[in-house]
Amino acid sequence: MHAVTADDHVPIPDGPVAVLANPTAGRGRHRGLLPDLLDRLSAAGRSVRLLRAGTATEAESACFTAVAEGAGALVAVGGDGTVHRAMQAVAGTSVPFGPIPAGTGNDFAVETGYPADPRAATDVIAAALRDGRTSPVDLARMASEDGTVRWYGAVLAAGFDAIVNERANRMRWPRGSRRYDLAILVELARLRPRRYTLTLDGERVEVDAVLVAVGNGASYGGGMRICPAADPTDGLLDVVVGGRFDRRTLIRVKPRIYAGTHVAHPLVRTYRARTVTLVAEGITTYADGERSLDLPVTITATPRALRLLR
């Protein structure tokens, strides 16, 4: 976890606090907490408006509408996917943001210093609203060749993990976590290095790899420290490339990602850059765990792109 410093010079806009809540986050285990969390936010002296949405696309649209209609702040209750959807509406704006970790994976919130407990995180956000306090943090801005732009706060996966997610999303059976487990087995059987072209601040690098991640933050997938040295306040992206792993080696190295010690493996290379262009055939990226843009993409570290309520 990296320190996020306070920035007391930019006032929080007037207007209600818009709240996006995902009742299915974390398999619904925090569903009953929502009324208490809303009460805690209201204690900051601001009106609180719960956004209505039935799908992920509707949730993102509701956040953009709330910001356009004058929301003074945006709060997301859920996991990294919910946070990712919400931050699209406030990235690069003066509207501050508060992530309340209530999902299976809460990497962005934890990495930026929020308590893992939803109630405690809500109290931090409420105190920041009451005191008019925000803290700037970097985001990664990704752009495709057709001009589509997305933002992410944690990690972009563009290798084996992204391929597994894509496989799991296409499967109709089985349901739940077993579908992801089966997708891993299928893709392990098909494992092969792919040719990637990386352009790092203008320097071109070609590699054969099975794991590629570009981190604004250190972790993804609920605490896997894939980019262990990444700091979301340093204005840089950390790129981790796992080279020509065979199945046995990948299975052996994968558990080391939780501690971040995989970067010491001789087949792993790390880079740091402000701008990264990533090219490979047939890869759909996953940003903050959400299906995102097809390669090629250009990712740019954008300092102070998000104001956190801290």
Image: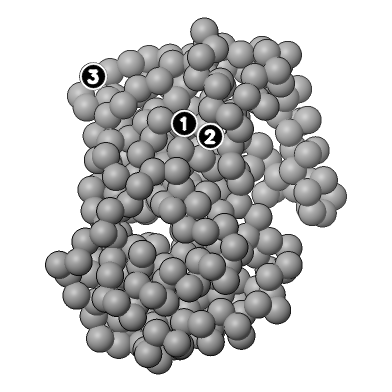
- Dot 1 lies on which element? loop
Looking at the picture, tell me which residue is in the foreground, 124 or 291: 124
Q: Earlier in the sequence, mark 1 or mark 3?
A: 3
Q: Quote the CA–CA distance across marks 3 and 2.
A: 26 Å
Q: Which residue is mark 1?
A: 228
Sooner in the amino-acid sequence: mark 3 or mark 2:
3
Tell me residue 3's x, y (percent).
Answer: 35, 47
Residue depicted at 20% across the width and 24% down the height = 202
Residue 116: image location, x then y, percent: 57, 57
Identify the element where label 2 is drawn. Answer: loop
Q: Which mark is residue 225?
A: 2
Sort mark 2 into few (<14), some (14-19) or many (20+) by Cα contacts within 10 Å: many
Residue at position x 44%, y 16% from top? 269
Q: Position of residue 271 (x, y in %)?
A: 35, 22
Which residue is at 59% across, 42% downward? Answer: 223
Horizontal side of 262 relative to 73 (left or right) equals: right
* Mark 3 burial class by Cα count in 10 Å: few <14, some 14-19, many 20+: few
Residue 281 image offset from top left, x and y in percent: 48, 28
Quarter occupied by the C terminus:
bottom left
- Which amino acid type is shown beneath numbered disc 1? Pro
Q: How many marks?
A: 3
Q: Are marks 3 and 2 in contact (CB under 8 Å)?
A: no
The quadrant of the image that shows the N terminus is top left
The residue under label 3 is 203
